[in-house]
Image: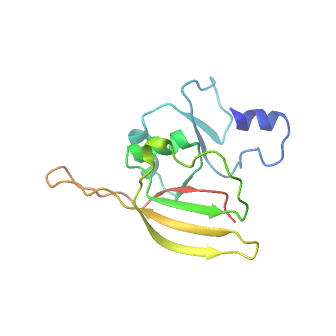
């Protein structure tokens, strides 16, 4: 619970925006959570269905490599918006857990900023469904994965 620890320490930028609903996936959530936080224990497909059925815009997901891989396992990420920072660090935390080294993407847009940051917007190419396995219709809401927005 890094965010909660950072909030208690008064670290700037660690507080949740009260105007935005925040979901935290946890196997051991606390007994209660202060709004706008909801702890999630349900399966990813059920959570994604519930979220897509609610009114609103795109869902921005930020999380660790394991959580992202879990959403990819369930075919529940539609897009990646990745910000490339102009600093080479040589090591770091992977974007996606090792089991997902090949995720087919289609570039939708690319934008560069005056500070050298580049934003890449990709659509995740979904595997084709076999005939007779039901429709692939979804509401207009899309799950996006993003780095820090500019």
Q: Position of residue 88 (x, y in %)?
A: 71, 59
> Is residue 18 shown left or right of residue 38?
right
- Closer to the camera in the image, 34 or 94: 94
- Whole-percent x, y for residue 132 in the image: 14, 52
**Quadrant of image for the N terminus:** top right
x 61%, y 47%: residue: 21
Q: Quadrant of residue 35?
A: top right
In the figure, 119 relative to 29: above or below?
below
> In the displayed structure, would residue 33 be above or below residue 60?
above
Q: Nearer the viewer, residue 84 or 16?
A: 84
In the picture, measured across the screen, residue 34 lies left or right of residue 81, that is right
Q: Residue at 85% x, 35% y: name it.
A: 9
Residue 74, horizontal then vertical, whole percent = 38, 44
* Total numbered labels placed on residues in the image: 0
* Residue at screen point 63% across, 57% down: 147
Residue 60, image x, y percentages: 56, 54
Residue extending furthest left? Answer: 132
- Quadrant into which the C terminus falls: bottom right
């Amino acid at each position: 619970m890094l965010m909660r620890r950072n909030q208690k320490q008064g670290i700037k930028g660690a507080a949740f925006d009260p105007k935005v609903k925040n979901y935290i996936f946890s196997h051991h959530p606390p007994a209660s959570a202060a709004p706008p936080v909801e702890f999630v224990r349900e399966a990813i497909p059920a959570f994604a269905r519930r979220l897509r059925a609610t009114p609103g815009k795109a869902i921005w997901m930020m999380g660790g490599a394991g959580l992202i891989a879990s959403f990819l396992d369930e075919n529940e990420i539609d897009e990646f918006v990745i910000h490339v920072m102009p600093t080479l660090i040589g090591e770091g935390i992977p974007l996606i857990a090792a089991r997902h080294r090949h995720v087919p993407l289609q570039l939708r847009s690319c934008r560069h900023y005056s500070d050298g940051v580049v934003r890449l917007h990709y659509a995740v190419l979904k595997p084709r469904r076999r005939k007779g396995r039901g429709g692939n219709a979804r509401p207009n809401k899309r799950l996006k994965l993003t780095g820090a927005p500019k």
